[in-house]
Amino acid sequence: MAIGRPLSHAEVLWFNYSAKMSDPLLYFHNILFLFLIFTLVPLPLVLLDLMGFKALDKYKLQPKVRLTFNGILKCYKDVAFMFFTVVGPLQLSSYPIVKMVGVRTGLPLPSMWEILAQLVVYFLIEDYGNYWMHRALHGKWGYEKIHRVHHEFTAPIGFAAPYAHWAEVLILGIPSFVGPALVPCHMVTLWLWIALRQIEAIDTHSGYEFPWSLTKFIPFYGGAEHHDYHHFVGGQSQSNFASVFTYCDYIYGTDKGYRFQKEHLSKMRRRWIAEGNGEVPQKMAQDQKLQ
Ligand SMILES: [Zn+2]
Ligand SMILES: [Zn+2]
C-alpha cells in the first residue's frame, strides 16, 4: 500500500467514495450537510412543542412561551432564503481559501485523536472569536443595524439558531473558519467541524435543557440555558455572549447577573423543599426560569 500499511475500513470507504470526485465537489458537500442539519435536527423538538407535548414542559426553559406554526414556518423560510442567497454562495466561493490553507482529501485518514484535538482547538477559537464579535454587535450601531434580527426571538427554537441579518451570518462565520485556517485538517474533519458547530448552535437555541444535556459531560459547555438567558434578556443584554463555552463570560465578567439569578433561584428552590413543601410546583419552576 502506498501509505505503508493496510488501509482501514474507513479508509477503504473514503477511497471508494472520494477517488473519482474533485476536491471542490467534496468541499461543497458542506452545503448539503448544513441544509439537512438545519432542516432535520430542530424538527423533533419543534414538532413536539407544536403538539403541546406536556411531558416536555418541565425541561422547557420558557414554558409559558409557545410559538405558532406560522411563526415557526416564517423563521424556517427566512433562514432557508438566507441559506440559498448567502451561506451557499459563501461556501461555493470560499473553496480557493480552503485549498490555500491546505485542507487535504487524500489518504491516510486522520486518527481519532487528531480529529478530536483539532475539533477542540476549533471550538476554542470559535468560542473566543464569537464572544468578542457578538459582544461588539451589542453596541448601539451593531445592535440596531444588524444583531437586532437575531434577537427577534426572545424564546429561541432550534430553527432560530441561524436566524440573523445577512451581515451577521458573514461576520459570525469568520471565527468558524479561523480554526481550520490556522490548523489545517482533512476534509472529513472539516465536514465534522461544520456539522458539529451547526448542531451545537441548534442545541443552544433549542429552548430545552434536558438532564442529559452536554453541560453535564463537557467542562464549561454553555448549553441551552446559558444562551436562552441571553435571548430572554434581549436587546439590553450585556450578558452570556459566548457561543459554546461559559469561561469567556466568566473571565470578562459578563455573566454576573446570570450567575446571581441562578444562585438566588436555586436557594429559593432549596428553601421551598427544606420547609417540607414537597416538590417545587410547576408554576414556581416556570417563574424561576423566567425571572
Ligand atoms: Zn446577542
Ligand atoms: Zn442566539
Image (cartoon, helix red, strand yellow):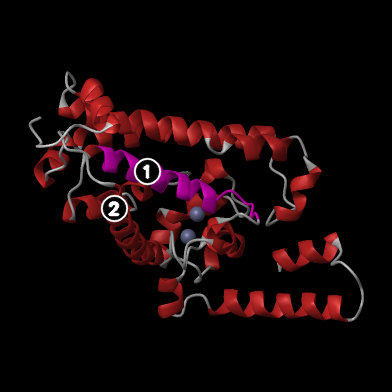
Q: Is residue 180 above or below residue 44?
A: below
Q: Is residue 77 above or below residue 247?
A: above
Q: Is residue 262 above or below residue 151?
A: below
Q: Secondary structure at mark 2?
A: helix
- Which callout, 1 or 2, points at the residue further toward the start of the chain? 2
Instruction: State the image quarter where residue 9 is shown.
Output: top left
Instruction: State the image quarter where residue 22 is shown.
Output: top left
Write the start and end of the magenta stretch as one range: 188-210
| Residue at 35% across, 67% down | 132
Quadrant of the image containing the N terminus: top left
| Residue 131 is at least partly visible in this image | yes
Q: Which mark is residue 129?
A: none
Task: Find residue 235 and report its horizontal and vertical position in percent.
Answer: 53, 63
Near mark 2 (Cα within 10 A), the count class, few <14, some 14-19 or many ≥20, is few
| Residue at 56% across, 39% down | 42
**Closer to the camera, 112 or 194?**
112
**Closer to the camera, 114 or 208?**
114
Q: Which mark is residue 166?
A: 1
> Extreme right residue here?
277
User: Could you tell me how many numbered marks the image carries?
Assistant: 2
Disc 1 marks a residue whose amino acid type is Trp
Q: Is 255 inside the magenta-drawn segment? A: no
Task: Estimate the spatial distance between the alpha carbons at disc 1 and disc 2, rounded to whole Å.
Answer: 36 Å
Instruction: State the image quarter where residue 186 is shown.
Output: top left
Q: Which residue is mark 2?
A: 113
Q: Is residue 64 above or below residue 90?
A: below
| Residue at 54% across, 68% down | 236
Quadrant of the image containing the C terminus: bottom right
